[in-house]
Image (tube, helix red, strand yellow):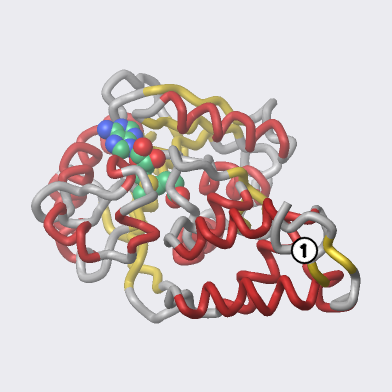
Amino acid sequence: MTGTGSIGACLERGARRLAEAGIPDARREARLILAHALGIEPVTVLGYPERPVDDADRYEELIARRAAREPLSHLTGRREFWSLEFEVTSTTLDPRADSETLVEAVLAAVPDYHAPLSIVDFGTGTGCLLLALLSEFPNATGLGVDIAEETLAVARRNAGRLGFADRAAFAIGNWGESLTGQFDLIVGNPPYIPAGEIAVLQREVTDYEPRRALDGGEDGLDAYRRLGPDIFRILRPGGIAALEFGLGQGTAVERLMLAEGLIAQGFSRDLAGHDRCLTLVKR
Ligand SMILES: C[S@@+](CC[C@H](N)C(=O)[O-])C[C@H]1O[C@@H](n2cnc3c(N)ncnc32)[C@H](O)[C@@H]1O
């Protein structure tokens, strides 16, 4: 047993170690890690600094992992998206706040929240996009597709824990290759980082997130080239598609989708003001 002391002392020690490791917002992260390690609310850490900590081993271990740049979400196993709490693991992409842009774009494009939509989510990961949409469209059902079975297991658990198991299904697949039928709404946040740029991303991403969730091929657009024909084939006439893309890729993604016969409805911007999502319709 090491590192005993008070909550306040543990917090100071952890925050210092994270700051030395170059973690921005070190104090806040140390507080969240301490709360997780002790099984208490983060607010308790702030409110009871004098409370003794009998065994800080777990906390020290988690601080060391964070100092080695493992993402906070991998330590806690949780990440919030669209005000829903998602399980994340090293097999899934950590849902990004910018991806909420896609959910907002769909809400703007489909004003009838009671529509009994059939949804496909390509590259579902944790299931965050699909489950956020199911939370907004109470009569919708959806299918999340991913190439990795271990990722789908996480998505299924998220659907169960968040209460959507009866409206969400998950299937392994290489984009839409094996899908038949017609769907009302298709969404996707495929891997879009140009392969040569992955090595220079934050270590939290390059060292800990699955490469298959990041690597978009030489120009970052490989997945869109594959998805274009699939989307056109399985989107019903009048149906909507919404695709997330990386910085500066909007025009290229639009060109690929228009070449398949889809009609662009417009771009939506993320929190930083960058075009992040393209909405399309099939006539
Ligand atoms: C950028 S992540 C997005 C995950 C999730 N939708 C999100 O927004 O957090 C891309 C996802 O696409 C999946 N993927 C990669 N190649 C695929 C393929 N050929 N077919 C289906 N899914 C694929 C990855 O496993 C990963 O979960």
Front residue of this view, candidates 281 and 244: 244
Decide if residue 248 is on the left or right side of residue 31: left
Q: Position of residue 213 (x, y in %)?
A: 33, 45
- Give residue 234's position: percent from left, percent from top: 34, 30
For the view shown, which residue lies furthest in the front direction? Answer: 1
Measured as percent of width and height from the top left, residue 231 is found at 30, 37
The quadrant of the rendering that contains the C terminus is top left
User: Which quadrant of the structure image shows residue 204?
Assistant: bottom left
Q: Residue at x 53, y 50 (%)?
A: 74
Residue at x-position 19% and y-position 37%: 226
Using the rendered view, name the quadrant where residue 187 is placed.
Answer: top left
Eyeballing the image, is 121 above or below 18?
Answer: above
Residue 136 higher or lower than 177, as above or below: below
Q: Residue at x 59, y 29 (%)?
A: 156
Relative height, residue 195 to residue 69 (above, below): above
Disc 1 residue crowd, few under 14, some 14–19, many 20+, Cα 10 Å: some
Residue at 16% x, 43% y is: 225
As helix, strand or loop, the secondary structure at mark 1 comes to loop
In this view of the protein, can residue 271 be seen by the observer? yes
Q: Label 1, on which residue?
A: 4
Q: Is residue 188 visible?
A: no
In this view, the residue in front, 55 or 70, is 55
Determine whether 183 is above or below 199 in the image.
above
Provide residue 138's location: percent of width, then percent of height.
70, 42
| Dot 1 amino acid type | Thr
Q: Quadrant of ligand 1?
A: top left
Q: Quadrant of residue 2?
A: bottom right
Q: Is residue 71 left or right of residue 193?
A: right
- Looking at the image, the residue that sits furthest to the left is 218
